[in-house]
């Protein structure tokens, strides 16, 4: 059973930075095809923030390009999201996601709250 645990959320002023971490149980990176970060603001749908496809480059939502950086450390089974120049509209609960294509499986963490004050 894959488990994903996010950490690093908190309260930060606009213009500040945070680094989120997603610790995965076991050596899942060898069986997972896509690792990503999603977020959900109150009253809004969950949206993709950034993702890394195995063997490929990272993809970002237009709203975070140039400000957020996704990365992963296979030796630590951990994925990161470095968030710089934060804006109040970045306020949301951020979720770690891991996808396996065959068989089709989605794993989710429980989320970590990021609040950006103006």
Image: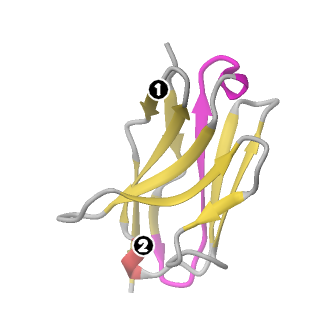
Give percent across and percent down for residue 68: 63, 69
Cα separation between marks 1 and 2: 30 Å
- Residue 7: say if magenta: no
Marks 1 and 2 in Cβ contact (< 8 Å): no
Q: Mark 2 points at which residue?
A: 90
Query: Crowding near pointer 1: few (<14 within 10 Å), some, many (20+)?
Result: few
Whether residue 44 sits left or right of residue 15 in the image: it is left
Q: Name the residue under label 1.
A: 104
SS for tag 1?
loop
Q: Quadrant location of residue 18? A: bottom right
Residue that sits furthest to the front in the current view: 102
Check the image and tell me how it is coloured. Answer: secondary structure
SS for tag 2?
helix
Query: Measured along the vertical axis of the image, is residue 31 above or below residue 68?
Result: above
Is 111 in front, or is 39? 39
Is 48 in front, or is 86? 48
Give percent across and percent down for residue 52: 66, 50
Q: Which residue is drawn at 67% across and 46% down?
A: 53
Query: Measured along the vertical axis of the image, is residue 102 above or below residue 109?
Result: above
Labelled disc at residue 39: none
Q: Residue at x 60, y 42 (%)?
A: 35
Which residues are drawn in magenta? 12-30
Q: Quadrant location of residue 40? A: bottom left
Give percent across and percent down for residue 34: 61, 41
């Amino acid at each position: 059973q894959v488990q994903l645990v996010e950490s690093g959320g908190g309260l930060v002023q606009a213009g500040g930075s945070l680094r989120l971490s997603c610790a995965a149980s076991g050596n899942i990176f060898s069986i997972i095809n896509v690792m990503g970060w999603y977020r959900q603001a109150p009253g809004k749908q969950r949206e993709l923030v950034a993702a890394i496809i195995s063997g490929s480059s990272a993809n970002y939502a237009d709203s975070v390009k140039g400000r957020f950086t996704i990365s992963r450390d296979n030796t630590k089974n951990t994925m990161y999201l470095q968030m710089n120049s934060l804006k109040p509209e970045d306020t949301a609960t951020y979720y770690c996601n891991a996808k396996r294509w065959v068989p089709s499986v989605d794993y989710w963490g429980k989320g970590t709250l990021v609040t950006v004050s103006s």
